[in-house]
Amino acid sequence: MRVLVTGADGFVGRHVVRRLVETGHEVVAACRPSGQLQSWPAGRWKDAVRVVPFELADSAGVRPALQEAPSAVIHLAAVASVREAREDPGRAWEINAAGTARLMEGLISARDRDGSDPVVLVISSAEVYGSGPASPRVETDPLRPRSPYAASKAGTEIAALEAWRRSTLKVIVARPFTHTGPDQRPPYVVPAFVQRLLAAKAGGPRQVPTGNLQPVRDLVDVRDVVEAYLGLLASGVPGETYNVARGEGITLDDLFRRIALLVQVDAEPVPDASLLRAGDIPYLVGDATKLRAATGWSPTITLDQTLRDMVDAQAH
């Protein structure tokens, strides 16, 4: 199967491309033109991956990727940072919501032109739920975004599902909860904690700056998230939305201390105003019952294993 992956050079995109190649698929890796397209992917992926330029800011930037007649699309390209979206909310909306609308329209036009009819997996975010009760979110819960990033991701969903209703384009929406793993970099919370704690162990200050450590999050390994995406390509129902979640919560304070134990450093978190995030969601845990029923997916990598892999990767 030929799979178009937008945002293929991002953190999740690289894991998606790797897994698709391992499972025998041909990959069209759509990356921003400003990236180093010729240097990635390298080595053993050269014959299995074709890299094409891709830009969501205008319709012309979308077209090159759509010439490849994919059998499936995994749409990851986005302003993916809450902090970046807050700095320029208009750009977040332009890329995430309007950009998705451009991609959907391009796919519809390509289908009308050449008969291609791909399954289109659109990656949203659990942040769209916003605040709610301290219980796992289900897909029918109301969307109450509390940040420009979350609002733009709700716009992503609206644009994608409107295209499905209007044209029967086979659109499926995934709402991943917080995911992390090898190759993720700061300022995301887990690699940031690892980096600061390793620095403390190497002789830096034992008082480590952090943001608010009270929120509860549902942490999933990115490699498990990728398996969920592949499962949805095969078994997801068009027009439906699926949570991708472990179903277990951990406070960021407990997460910090668990990483400190792995690093083997006696460090103390100290609140830093510059790291506080306005509109933090106090509790964000997901119920993935619907995903399990559709695909049989469940996470296989424990949180401890994920954290151990990330500490090892940064330490070496």
Image: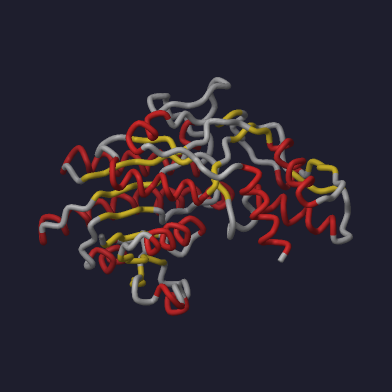
Establish if 37 lies above or below 65: below
- How many tags in the picture? 0
Image coords of residue 181 (percent x, y): 58, 52
Q: Quadrant of the C terminus?
A: bottom right
Establish if 226 lies above or below 63: above
Q: Seen in the image, is 189 located left or right of residue 139?
A: right
Q: Quadrant of residue 312?
A: bottom right
Q: How is the image coloured?
A: secondary structure
**Residue at image coords 74%, 36%:** 253
**Residue at image coords 65%, 41%:** 277
Image coords of residue 255 (percent x, y): 70, 40
Front-most of residues 234 and 62: 234
**Residue at image coords 34%, 53%:** 74
Q: Quadrant of the N terminus?
A: bottom left
**Residue at image coords 33%, 63%:** 24
Q: Quadrant of residue 278?
A: top right
Image coords of residue 34 (percent x, y): 45, 72
Establish if 149 lies above or below 140: below
